[in-house]
Image: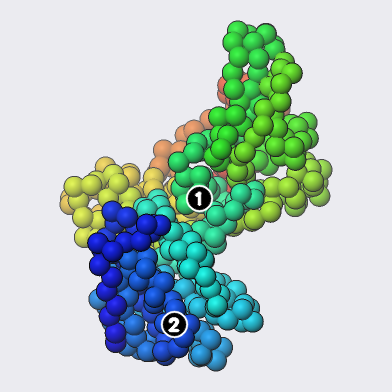
């Protein structure tokens, strides 16, 4: 083991760590010219470097969270390399592993990213390339407080998000309702070079169709009845930064054509206006729908989908990321009960109940469950009975028996009743029944647009609610 210390007083003028403590970096691999070059470059970036010849020498139990580790992969055969990286990520899941590979071994880099490595460095490399990599990870650490991703799927997603954030290409984030698509969009913005520029979000499903064009593109005074003053649109407000188009699958076809033109020309013209406004906006779209299927069924333009789906990110449902459940639960405990210690508040039985639940509402359902448990718990600790989960709805001695003709979604209904959402959803169903299944009239009675009602019904189905209409 060798230590390389670089004094904080000797920071280079272009260092990204001015006024920051020297960062600890680990370098793994046999001595070589490439390794010596890496260590010299890291030293000039005011890092504290510790070198080990082999992975087995690493003191994994004593390493700081989110430590950055450069692993020289060129000297290892592929099987040994993948085995060592898999072991590292299993034993130290918060470790940020960056393989250093030769240019002709780029396929290794791709495989290692899929395994959970956060980045890679191609050798030979230049000092600006290394500095840019360090900058990305410094920014990522400052943005990490918004995400909890300890599962392999989560780590892969964050690693990909960190890389795509450095581009200005459009991103399409897909995933079920409640998985955290807007949170991921905000993370990408905070991790981008335009982090100090505006981040503007618009929910395409929540705005009435007749208002959406004005909201997106803005309008001049007198452009329509009620336009008493000129107003900038979301594109203008996000200029220089990031615009999130949430629930993009709900955008009407007519507006899809106008949006496509704005994206192609990078100019926008307000309603009633004659002046084109130059744009420099990074577009992130999000949807819980399968846009390819929407295109096939004629509800979404294929040319717009291809324009948006340049860099796709898919957020897996929480049921496929079991390793994230308990860290997220403790995060929510710290958020809603900062005076308490989340690591100690959940009993083992409560942890088992959280892991056993299917989470049809994903992270949003987990957050609501923890928030409710903190209010309704009997005593200091959170027990399974405090969680109000469908899996815990019946006593252990009398397991829940479903009628043969009753759908499995009844489990989800029990959770909805416990969370207070069932009454709201039942009101929606009763209103539609009262109007003979006519959803337009039902939407008007409920005080929402037909499109917003369709969105609500989709969300209800995803929560496990049977809608016999």
Visible residue check, residue 78: yes
Q: Secondary structure at mark 1?
A: loop
Residue 274 at x, y percent in the picture: 74, 18
**Quarter of the C terminus within the rendering:** top right
- Of residue 275 and residue 445, the one placed in the foreground of this image is 275
Q: In the visual, does 50 lie left or right of 178?
A: left
Q: Is residue 425 left or right of residue 336?
A: right
Residue under the image location 45 percent in, 41 percent down = 196
Whether residue 436 appears in this view of the structure is: no
- Circle number at residue 35: 2
In terms of sequence position, does the residue under pointer 1 or pointer 2 come before the other?
A: 2
**Callout 2: 10 Å neighbours few (<14), some, many (20+)?**
many
**Circle 1 sits on which residue?**
192
104 relative to 325, above or below: below
Q: Which residue is pictured at 47% across the width and 34% down the height?
A: 423
At x 33%, y 45%, the residue is 371
Q: CA distance from mark 1 to mark 2?
A: 29 Å
Q: Quadrant of the N terminus?
A: bottom left
Across and down, in percent, residue 190 comes to 46, 47
């Amino acid at each position: 083991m060798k230590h390389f210390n670089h004094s904080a007083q000797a920071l280079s003028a272009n260092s990204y760590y001015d006024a920051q403590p020297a960062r600890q970096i680990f370098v793994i691999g046999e001595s070589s010219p490439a390794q010596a070059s890496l260590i010299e470059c890291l030293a000039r970036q005011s890092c504290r470097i510790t070198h080990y010849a082999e992975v087995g020498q690493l003191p994994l139990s004593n390493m700081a969270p989110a430590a950055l580790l450069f692993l020289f992969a060129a000297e290892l055969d592929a099987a040994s390399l993948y085995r060592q990286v898999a072991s590292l990520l299993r034993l130290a899941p918060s470790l940020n592993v960056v393989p250093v590979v030769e240019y002709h071994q780029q396929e290794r880099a791709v495989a290692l990213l899929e395994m959970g490595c956060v980045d890679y460095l191609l050798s030979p490399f230049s000092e600006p390339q290394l500095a840019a990599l360090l900058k990305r990870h410094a920014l990522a650490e400052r943005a990490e407080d918004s995400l909890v991703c300890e599962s392999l799927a989560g780590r892969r997603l964050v690693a990909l998000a960190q890389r795509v954030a450095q581009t200005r290409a459009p991103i399409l984030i897909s995933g079920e309702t409640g998985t955290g698509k807007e949170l991921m969009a905000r993370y990408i913005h905070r991790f981008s070079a335009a982090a100090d520029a505006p981040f503007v979000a618009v929910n395409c499903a929540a705005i009435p169709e007749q208002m959406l064009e004005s909201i997106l593109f803005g309008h001049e005074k007198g452009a329509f009845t009620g336009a008493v003053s000129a107003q900038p649109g979301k594109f203008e407000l996000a200029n220089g930064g990031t615009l999130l188009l949430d629930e993009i699958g709900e955008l009407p076809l007519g507006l899809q054509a106008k949006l496509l033109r704005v994206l192609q020309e990078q100019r926008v013209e307000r309603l009633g206006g004659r002046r084109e406004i130059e744009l420099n906006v990074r577009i992130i779209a999000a949807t819980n729908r399968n846009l390819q299927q929407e295109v096939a069924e004629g509800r979404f333009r294929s040319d717009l989908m291809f324009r948006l789906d340049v860099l796709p990110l898919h957020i897996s449902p929480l049921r496929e990321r079991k390793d994230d459940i308990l860290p997220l639960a403790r995060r929510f405990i710290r958020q809603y009960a900062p005076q308490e210690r989340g690591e100690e508040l959940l009993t083992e039985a409560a942890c088992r109940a959280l892991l056993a639940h299917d989470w049809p509402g994903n992270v949003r359902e987990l957050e609501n469950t923890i928030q409710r448990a903190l209010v309704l718990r009997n005593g200091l600790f959170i027990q399974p009975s405090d969680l109000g989960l469908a899996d815990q709805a019946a006593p252990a001695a009398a397991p829940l028996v479903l009628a043969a003709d009753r759908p499995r979604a009844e489990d989800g209904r029990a959770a909805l009743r416990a969370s207070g959402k069932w009454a709201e959803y039942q009101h929606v169903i009763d209103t539609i029944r009262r109007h003979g299944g006519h959803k337009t009239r039902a939407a008007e009675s409920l005080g929402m647009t037909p499109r917003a009602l369709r969105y609500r019904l989709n969300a209800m189905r995803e929560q496990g609610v049977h809608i016999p209409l």
